[in-house]
Amino acid sequence: MDSSTNYQEAGSEVVSLRNSFLLPTAKLDDQKFEFYFIMDVSGSMYGRPWELASRALFLFLQSLPADCYFNVITFDEDFTCIFPQSVKYSQETLEQAKSEIPELFTGGYTEDFINVLNYVLSCPQVPGYLTQIFSLTDAELTSEPEETVKLYAANSKRFRSFCLGIGNRVDQDMVKRIAGGNPGMYDYVRTNEFMESKVLNLLKLSLKPALLKPIRVSSHSKLTQVLEP
């Protein structure tokens, strides 16, 4: 049997499989993270979708690990950052971010995602911290959607991308593509759905070290085979 083939007993859950030939030089729990939360504040998010996105962001922020950095960026035809650069997570920075969330919605017309991503890529990474991007959007991108997806793909080794699709009109295919097509790294929250478990599951997966590959396994299968590259 090839040594790069891993097997995992499959239930109806998300699991993580590690390449058998990768030997980490440090303990897995030593990984630290920098989080960018990219919030869609365009007109298509008006009303219930914005309420869902705001609640999801509150939950994300309140659940972050103690030793991390974070920032919140909103976008429509332009983008705005809560902090000039990612900041150390503390009670003070958490409360400052939370206090600004209710005022973030602008209702602009064009969803200019690609400029936000270029900005994040231009920011210096915090040494020793893995960058994670969480996008909260209905994914109805009207400005350069294909270029945005290509930019995500081209920089997949620089950061990990997670996406929470918001609302009943969410573009499911674009949500998947923003997350690089990786099962377990995206989910959807529609009107009248409970979001807490979905938000916390995405955050939990993001806290896995970079050498772990999250996959979603089906309850219809007793054994899932994953061929690692």
Image (cartoon, rainbow, N blue to C red):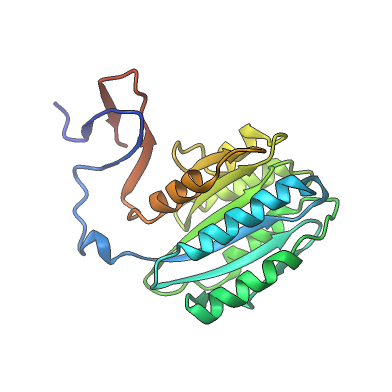
**Residue 140 or 200: which is nearer the viewer?**
200
Q: Work out whether 197 lies above or below 90.
A: above
* Residue 119 in sight here: no
When asked about the image quadrant of residue 100, the answer is bottom right
**Outermost residue, left direction?**
1
Expressed as whole percent of the image width and height from the top left, the position of residue 106 reads 82, 60
In front of the other: 165 or 26: 165
Task: Name the residue located 67 percent from the left edge and 38 percent from the top edge.
Answer: 191
In the depicted structure, whether residue 6 falls above or below residue 186: above
Is the N terminus in the top left, top right, bottom left or bottom right quadrant?
top left
Of 106 and 73, which appears nearest the observer?
106
Q: Residue at (47%, 58%) from the top-left corner?
A: 158
Residue 63, quarter of the rendered image:
bottom left
**Is residue 14 placed above or below 208 in the rendered structure?**
above
Q: Is residue 205 above or below residue 192?
A: below
Residue 156 in view: yes
Give the tally of numbered discs: 0
- Residue reaching furthest to the top: 220
Q: Residue 21: x percent and y percent?
A: 19, 45
Q: Quadrant of the C terminus?
A: top left
Which residue is farthest right? 109
Q: Which residue does the image show at 46% across and 38% down from the upper left?
A: 182
Q: Is residue 94 left or right of residue 210?
A: right
Residue furthest out toward the bottom: 92
Q: In the image, residue 109 lies at what x, y percent? A: 86, 51
The one of 149 and 111 positioned closer to us in this rendering:
111
The x, y position of residue 153, in whole percent, is: 54, 46
22 left or right of 188 in image: left
